[in-house]
Image (spheres, helix red, strand yellow):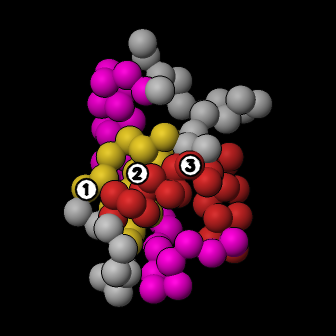
Amino acid sequence: MLTQAEKKQLKALASVEKVRYQLGKNEITDSLLEMLDKALTARELIKIDVMSSVDDSIMELALDLSSKLHAEIVQVVGKVIILYRKNKEKQRIKLKK
């Protein structure tokens, strides 16, 4: 579980990141989960843009993705979901406590 200070730090890091992944009308597929899993392993912090064609609630999608990817939701802003998962083998982001 992330503390408020850690979330604040991750939000600042995410603000300079470009949205790299999109969730479209096909919604959550195995190939999407595999791609996001690899991205979280490599980057630890990812932004996902939810296309306007998606009917589900953004928060429901964020919760579903976070549980399937074993990641934490940093923030949901508009149609953008920010997820974080620490890489235990090669940590890229050092969080201050």
Residue at image mark 3: 67
Disc 1 to disc 2, C-alpha distance: 8 Å
Residue at image mark 1: 77
Q: Would you say 30 lies left or right of 14 here? A: right
Q: Determine if the magenta segment contains residue 86.
A: no
Q: Position of residue 50 (x, y in %)?
A: 38, 72
User: Which residue is at the far top?
Assistant: 97
User: Which residue is at the far left?
Assistant: 78
Disc 3 to disc 2, C-alpha distance: 14 Å
Residue at image mark 2: 82
Amino acid beneath label 2: Ile
Relative to the observer, which residue lies in front, 17 or 63?
63
Q: Residue at x 38, y 41 (%)?
A: 74
Amino acid beneath label 3: Ser
Crowding at dot 1, Cα within 10 Å, few <14 / some 14-19 / many 20+, comes out as: few
Query: Which image quarter holds the C terminus?
Result: top left
Q: Residue at x 46, y 73 (%)?
A: 22
Crowding at dot 3, Cα within 10 Å, few <14 / some 14-19 / many 20+, comes out as: few
Q: Which of label 3 and label 2 is nearer to you?
A: 3
Which structural element holds mark 3? helix
